[in-house]
Amino acid sequence: MWISGTSQYAIRAVVFVAGAGGGAPVRVGEVAKALQVPRNYLSKTLHALSRDGVLTSTRGPRGGFRLAVPPGQLTLARVAAPFDDVDSKPCLLGRTQCSGRRPCAAHAQWGAVSAALQQFFSRTTIADLMDGGRRATARRLHPPAAARRARVRDT
Amino acid sequence: MWISGTSQYAIRAVVFVAGAGGGAPVRVGEVAKALQVPRNYLSKTLHALSRDGVLTSTRGPRGGFRLAVPPGQLTLARVAAPFDDVDSKPCLLGRTQCSGRRPCAAHAQWGAVSAALQQFFSRTTIADLMDGGRRATARRLHPPAAARRARVRDT
DNA sequence: TGTATTTATCATGTGGATATGATAAATATT
DNA sequence: AATATTTATCATATCCACATGATAAATACA
């Protein structure tokens, strides 16, 4: 999986909304302007995120979008989910042939790389992408060697 | 980067051609049939690989395609290169903003995942994907722990 | 030289992701 | 109730990867 442009918009937009604080809702226009992204397209994207429980939307004056989940609990995988099948782990050479028995020769190696990707999306949160979130991310994704070995063993 | 369908065709086709031995050239029709892939589209793909020096082509009766590079020296990155920009390592959230200084917060973590992907493509060869190539691949991509630590340090 | 065989190339079609512009529906404020 | 503001939705357009079908060009071989 490589994430689509729409998912990139979604992640950046959610980061922006999260950064605006929990106060007043953020309007599509603001987000679109800040992100330099087409307004109506973003509107649909944010609407999809609302349907999915990532944002809440309010119509009318003083309306807009708010986070529905604390940024520290909101993974990139969840934000991208409505737009990309982030969890699929297809065969490198086209899906059907190599799953299960008779895997292609590089199946295991590819699986490891693929799993690392998925872990990135399922472990990184919106909070990690906000300014000031750097150290927390680094600690979780680069644990000391002993812990890392332990985790790899049971994956 | 996630590789396109065309690159997948290319890799599978090259593996097939490599598997046919160095004897007679392999015709597009054979490859297309074996891979269950549209013939004319594959034709263009193989032609591109010839232009790129991965295959050699011969026209007319007894013509077809042959490998131009020993399979053990032919990386997946090279085969995919005409169709995908395998070497690009864009920002997770859309290119321009976060390269160089002012990287986005997850830049480093993403870079590590991204680098692992690139290494997979630049280290895995066509020989590794042919039947019987499994052990060689496993040895190179899963070196003993000491060697792995050493390599990581200088990357 | 002619003919069959095979790659090379051209013109065109299709589907999905991305984008645009207009209109509908909801709601706070007066 | 009227109005302004904002999201929701509809209809359509654009672009590109992928694909199809037809034709041209090269070449082995009778």
Image (tube, coloured by chain):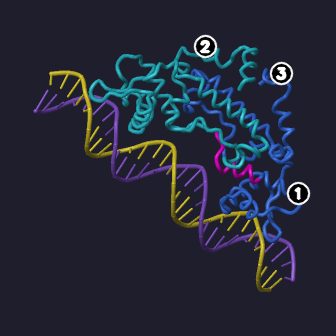
Chain colours: A cyan, B blue, C yellow, D purple
Is disc 2 placed on a helix, strand or loop?
helix
Question: What residue type is disc 1 on?
Answer: Gly
For the residues beneath circles 1 and 2, the answer to whether they share a chain is no
Q: Which residue is mark 1?
A: B22
Q: Amino acid at mark 2?
A: Arg
The residue sitting at 85% across, 21% down in the picture is B146
Residue B11 is inside the magenta segment: yes
Viewer-closest of A35 and B6:
B6
Residue pointed to by mark 2: A135
Q: Earlier in the sequence, mark 1 or mark 3?
A: 1
Considering only vertical position in the picture, is A130 above or below A30? above
What's the residue at 70%, 52% (across, down)?
A: B9
**Magenta-colored span:** B1-13
Estimate the x, y position of residue B124 in percent, counting from the top left: 79, 39
- Residue B150's disc is 3
- Whether residues under marks 2 and 3 lie with C-beta atoms below 8 angstroms apart, the answer is no
Q: Chain of mark 1?
A: B
